[in-house]
Image (spheres, helix red, strand yellow):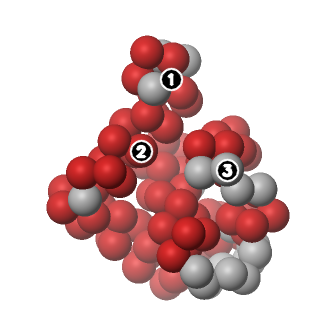
């Protein structure tokens, strides 16, 4: 989960503190939700565990974020490209960038 957090932060030019912080701006909230989704997808961590990693958020917040990203990946081409690029970096496939 820590590697996913740092990779997402780096991809969006954010700090890990911004991703785990309280900001609700779209520039931070969408990458944070993508981070939630990737942690869930790649590690099978529970919603409460992901909430703790991302600044002590409630499990229902994590559930909402994962559902939102799951839907957005289908509808938002840029988000889909970001998701695929980050997954490529996490798998060690730099060509995905």
Mark 1 is surrounded, within 10 Å at the Cα level, by few (under 14), some (14 to 19) or many (20 or more) other residues, namely few
Mark 3 is surrounded, within 10 Å at the Cα level, by few (under 14), some (14 to 19) or many (20 or more) other residues, namely few
Query: Which percent across, then down, holds residue 93?
Result: 48, 16
Label 1 element class: loop
User: Where 85 falls versus 30 (above or below)?
Assistant: above
At x 54%, y 51%, the residue is 39
Query: Which percent across, then down, holds residue 83?
Result: 40, 45
Mark found first going from the N terminus, 3 or 2: 3
- Indicate which label's residue lies in the foreground, 3 or 2: 3
Tag 3–tag 2 contact (CB < 8 Å): no
Give the farthest residue toward the left: 75
User: Where 64 falls versus 6 (above or below)?
Assistant: below
| Location of residue 87 by image quarter | top left
Mark found first going from the N terminus, 3 or 1: 3
Marking on residue 91? 1
The residue where tag 2 is placed is 82
Q: Is residue 13 left or right of residue 17?
A: left
At x 50%, y 23%, the residue is 91
The residue where tag 3 is placed is 13
Query: Which percent across, then down, holds residue 44?
Result: 49, 49
């Amino acid at each position: 989960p820590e590697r996913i957090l740092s990779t997402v932060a780096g991809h969006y030019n954010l700090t890990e503190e911004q991703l785990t912080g309280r900001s609700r701006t779209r520039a931070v909230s969408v990458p944070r939700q993508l981070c939630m989704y990737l942690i869930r997808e790649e590690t099978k961590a529970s919603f409460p565990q992901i909430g703790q990693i991302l600044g002590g958020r409630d499990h229902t917040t994590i559930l909402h974020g994962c559902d939102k990203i799951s839907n957005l990946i289908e509808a938002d081409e840029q988000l889909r490209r970001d998701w695929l690029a980050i997954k490529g970096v996490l798998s060690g496939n730099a060509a995905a960038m």
